[in-house]
Image (cartoon, rainbow, N blue to C red):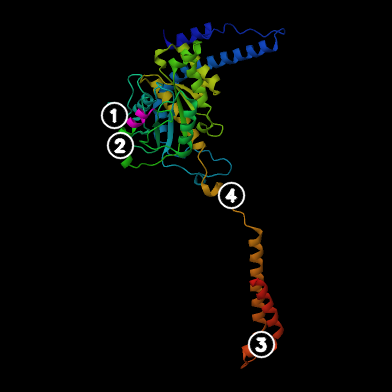
Amino acid sequence: MSMKFEHRTMIENDGMGFGEVNEVGDGFSSAALDFEASRRRRHNAYREVLQSYDELQIRSENLKEAKSKILSYTPGAWMEKVGGMQLTDYDVPKTTSLILIGPKGSGKSSLVNRISKVFEEDKFASERAQVSYSSVGDGTYFLQEYMIPKSSTSFCLYDTRSLSDDPSNNDEILKLWMTKGVRHGDPVIRNSDSPSLRTSMKCKDRWNRFLSSEIRVVNFVIFVVNGISVLKSMDSNDDSETKYSQTLARAFSCPYVSFKDDKPVVVVTHGDLLSLSDRARIRVHLGELLGIPPAKQIFDIAESCDPVTELTITDMLCFCLEHADKNLPRKSWITKKVPTVPLSTYILLLITLGIVIISAYVHHAHIPHVKGAKPHAKLHKASPKLDIHWHKIRHLWLE
């Protein structure tokens, strides 16, 4: 079945089980009206997501131009000039840093490899990120930096360790990354890690301690989720399954991963193993769960190398880089408050200025204008009272 035919069939049958949308009668209760409004909103979101797949098919013809836009990006180039601010007023990084965050098995490392292949000229190059084959461990234990593409320094991706089942561990590590920055090769150690795991990580880190790399500020966040795990949590009443969505919602709501009102983008992986209807349902569900538009801020990136998938990747990166430039931090000299000067300092300055003025006036008033006069003798003979006043002023100043 073609994608377009499947799309049309789902619209007609309403793949989410909505059925026909009837007019709301006058006899509906308040709760029923709320339910009906929610149902219609979900129905419209579902249709919009399905239509986005068709739009990608059409726009994939312009894939080359979309990729060129990403490749021509430089940090700060897409900044919006608002509030009278100029690019020079912002702290523009040498490299824009995008960090990947997600639960275990979400496919963060695989996503790095797919993104890298889109922009690398050598299509036969080996995969850059180590991908976990089994469910043993958490995959990535050390922060890994990947320039996109390799030869560029415009922006990079940071692969991270999977989110923990303990929300407090996630809050702590997310706060650390977002406030202190990230550095290539740093181990990601949790308070809940066992002594044996800590020892193992220290052994693996034995060479990294002698190397130094730049600490980078995180400029935007990409939240990566496994579409199959989300679908299970949607259709199951089992606590072990629904916990996946709870972990997502808790980590996504961490205030440190958002930039003012801009929330992270979400990438859904493993969609190629699901039907188009299920993929649309997952995006709508995540939109409601996380409070973001499913058709605009949730990207379905499958395990394939077709033009539609590559365009989805470029759209996602475009969104991230635009919002990274939009939220660049201001330079410290602009945000720093003007230091307050104590009142006593002003008084002292005024007194000093007054003494200088009086001293200059007295000196000028007693300069002799007659030839051959002895200036110092005449000054002291002619102004004994002024000398007394001067000594009084000096005495008050010293006090």
Q: Is residue 122 magenta?
A: no
Q: Name which residue lies at 51% across and 36% down.
A: 326
Q: CA distance from mark 2 to mark 4?
A: 44 Å
Q: Amino acid at mark 3?
A: His
Q: Name which residue lies at 54% across and 40% down.
A: 81
Disc with the residue nearer the chain's start (1 vs 4): 1
- Residue 124 drawn at (x, y percent): 27, 26
Q: Indicate whether 392 appears above or below 285.
A: below
Report if the CB atoms under discs 2 and 4 are less than 8 Å apart: no
For label 1, the residue is 122
Q: CA distance from mark 4 to mark 3?
A: 52 Å
Residue 33 appears in the picture as rendered:
yes
Span of residues in magenta: 194-200
Q: Indicate whether 355 appears above or below 48.
A: below
Q: Amino acid at mark 1?
A: Asp
- Residue 175 drawn at (x, y percent): 49, 34
- Nearer the camera: disc 4 or disc 3: 3
Q: Amino acid at mark 2?
A: Arg
